[in-house]
Image: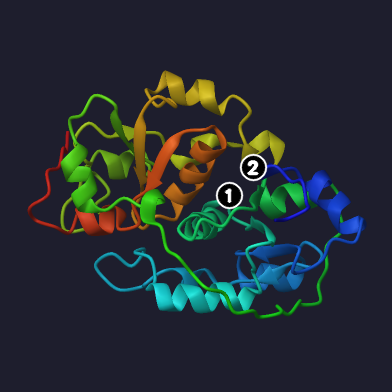
Amino acid sequence: MSTLKLPYLAEPAVLYQQIEHGAVAPELIIIDVGSAENYARGHVPGAIHLPYAWLVSGAPPAPGTMANTDQLEKVIDHLGITPQSHVVVYDDDGGGHAGRLLWTLDLIKHPHMSYLNGGLHAWAGDGLPLQTEPNQPQPTRNQYQWDFAARATKDDILAELGQSDFAVWDARNPTEYRGENVQALRGGHIPDAINVEWTNLLDPGQNLRIRKDAKEYLAKHGLTEHQRIVTHCQAHRRSSLTYLAGKSLGFNIRGYDGSWGDWGNDPNTPIDAP
């Protein structure tokens, strides 16, 4: 068990205090899922860079579908993550890339993880130091037991559509939701899906931290902790941010990694397109 006491939404100052107190791998593993260019310009001290592409299949028509488990096990081993590690993840683009890694770690029931609230924007905005030298991981070898409770498939959604306690959270922008901006064979949205764009969860005035009134804001749009929620976007990047936000609020939430690339390219799935 990790001895670090970091909340799921970790503020930059709290993480910096742990770094200053000497927390290092494998007890504390900090992972940057932003661009390689921004990592080279400056990253959280001690952070390891992870290319986002390693987490997804990249295969059409649904390139955001999770990579196969053998590949993901190699990624996690490469990063040096052990069951005792507290993993802190961030990115440079609002949290979608970071959320995707956190969602992946949920599939192996990793017990200790945090999102650096606001990511690199908040860290730099708070005036905390950046490191430019790259950090190398200390690879390990784990035994894995996969648990897909945090993952939803197309068949899961089809089976649950219409149930009173079930909701689909569409994290795409409204033009995609309405079928005006078509990114697949068909445009529109899953019937009865609730459209709350992922960026609406971010507070630009607080360096892209998750907004403090997120729970109240979502309730006004019909999303609460009393529902079983599946969230998606086009490729489960944007919806990885809504997944982690929902999880931080105690929601019963799953991520649909196939997302609209899967649903919208299937000629047989039901679609609403007002």
Label 1 packing within 10 angstroms: few (<14), some (14-19), many (20+):
many
Residue 202 is drawn in which quadrant? top right
Please rate how many residues cluster around mark 2, counting C-alpha atoms within 10 Å: few if below 14, some from 14 to 19, many from 20: many
Residue type, mark 2 in image: Leu
In this figure, which colouring scheme has been used for the structure? rainbow
Q: Which residue is pictured at 83% across the width and 68% down the height?
A: 131
Residue 167 left/right relative to 241:
left
Relative side of 154 to 3, left or right:
left
Tell me what residue is drawn at x 39 percent, y 55 percent: 236
From the viewer's perspective, tell me whether residue 94 is left or right of residue 258: right
Nearer-the-camera pick, 236 or 185: 236
Q: Mark 2 = which residue?
A: 208
SS at badge 1: loop
Q: Quadrant of the C terminus?
A: top left
- The quarter of the rendered structure image containing the N terminus is bottom right
At which x and y percent is residue 103?
48, 54
Which is nearer the eye, 271 or 156?
156
Quickly name the residue at label 1: 94
Q: Is residue 183 visible?
A: no
Q: Residue at x 17, y 59 (%)?
A: 265
The residue sitting at 23% across, 47% down in the picture is: 156
